[in-house]
Amino acid sequence: MKITDAKVFVGGPGKNYVTLKIMTDQGVYGLGDATLNNRETLPAAYLQDFLIPNLIGLDPRKSEDIWQFFYRGAYFRGGPIAMAAYGAIDMALWDIKGKLAGMPLYQLFGGKSREGAMVYAHATGADLEDLMDSIAHYVEKGYKAVRVQCGIPGMPSASYAVPEHKGAGKHYISDFSGIRPKVEVWDTGRYMRYMPGALAEIRDRFGPDLHILHDVHHRLLPREAAEFAKAVEPAGLFWLEDPTPAEDQDALGLLRAHATVPIAIGEVFNSIWDCNKLIEKELIDFIRVAVTYAGGITPVKRIVDLAGMHHVRTGFHGAPSHSPLCMAAQAHLNAWAPNFGIQEYLVLGTPACDALFPSDHRMENGLFHVSDAPGLGVDFNELEAARYKYTPGSHPIVRLEDGTLWNY
Ligand SMILES: [Mg+2]
């Protein structure tokens, strides 16, 4: 069996999805997602210029050897661009493997460990009352877990993932289109003084059963993160996400020494080497890698197994930049993983997105139910894809009030 051709598509409804389609001499094809948010053309170019010419003629069933060929075979290894491209290839090869076996991928991993996988939604508000309305909206829809972000009184601009105007919280996506990034202004003191009380009010309002998550988005220094984690303990969070940038991983020991709030980190990680220390030292409780950015199902399954040895559960990244293909790869891992925790899930199921990526994966009452179709269980409509073109975009950047550049 041989790979005969592969194509890359860039575009989609409101997002520049990078979709890889690998064709074989037996008519079976595989699909993968290489979408690197706001840098989408880079993995697409790496696939087109280098990886696809090397794929032609290989046996698509040898997904492990092909992964090693690209990763270990590269002199300059890793990084988000390369790993997103390898991730798409690996997903597509697993898709082919499942189709050849006539089985959904979760069966190849070891079968289902649960019927539905708990997901969390993003509730946001320009202020706390606005956020309360947004949380209530998701609770009414059956969500058991909600990430909560709100505007901070006196903050010079909307804080992380928060709309500038009230009422936008139910559909708010914080991405910004345009090649030059929008500038947000951050004030650590105001955030640290306000947010613990806001989280306590949310807990009071929604009771003990709702899982509440909060994302600091790398904004605090290690000592500040330790103080903040201690201050939010009474709110009983499901997790506190990215309290500090994870470049200085030993710094998390300070936070661990002062608070028991569960910590989730890893959405920007690209390999097991980015997270093995955090997992082995048990400095985190949830690992947030994404199948696309961390190089595919093959390496992420190894991360899940390593995490399981250290009581670390999964909480895969699920920003709207991931196409339904990456979300499907993660859904199959979520169905299987004995150490599954939760899945971030931003509703992808718009009619336009469903037309581009038809599937029967489904969400019900805050649980994701994985499809039983062979492979990933998601198809790709090339006629629909022809309607879309690439639109440049950028994440915002963050500055302190005096102009100092800060962590987005
Ligand atoms: Mg995050």
Image (cartoon, rainbow, N blue to C red):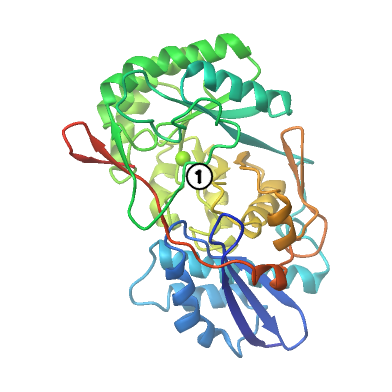
Res. 236 in view: no
Whether residue 318 sits left or right of residue 30 in the image: it is: left
Q: Tell whether 204 sits left or right of 97.
A: left
Q: Position of residue 363 (x, y in %)?
A: 75, 41
Mark 1, ligand 1, within 8 Å: the answer is: yes
Q: Nearer the viewer, residue 373 or 259?
A: 373
In the rendered image, the vertical position of residue 22 relative to residue 136, given as above or below: below
Quick one: quadrant of the N terminus?
A: bottom right
Point out residue 294 in the picture as x, y percentages from the top left corner: 49, 58
Give the crowd class for mark 1: few <14, some 14-19, many >=20 residues within 10 Å: many
The residue positioned 60% from the left and 66% from the top of the image is 388
Q: Nearer the viewer, residue 155 or 296?
A: 155
Q: Which one is in front, 43 or 316?
A: 43
> Percent x, y for residue 148?
52, 27
Task: Tell me where residue 128 appears, x and y as whole percent.
Answer: 48, 17
Residue 217, quarter of picture: top left
Amino acid found under the numbered disc labelled 1? Arg
Is residue 80 visible in the rendered image? The answer is yes
Q: Which residue is mark 1?
A: 288
The quadrant of the image that shows the C terminus is: top left
The residue at the point 32 percent across, 32 percent down is: 253
Q: Nearer the viewer, residue 95 or 132?
A: 132
The image quadrant that residue 90 belongs to is bottom right
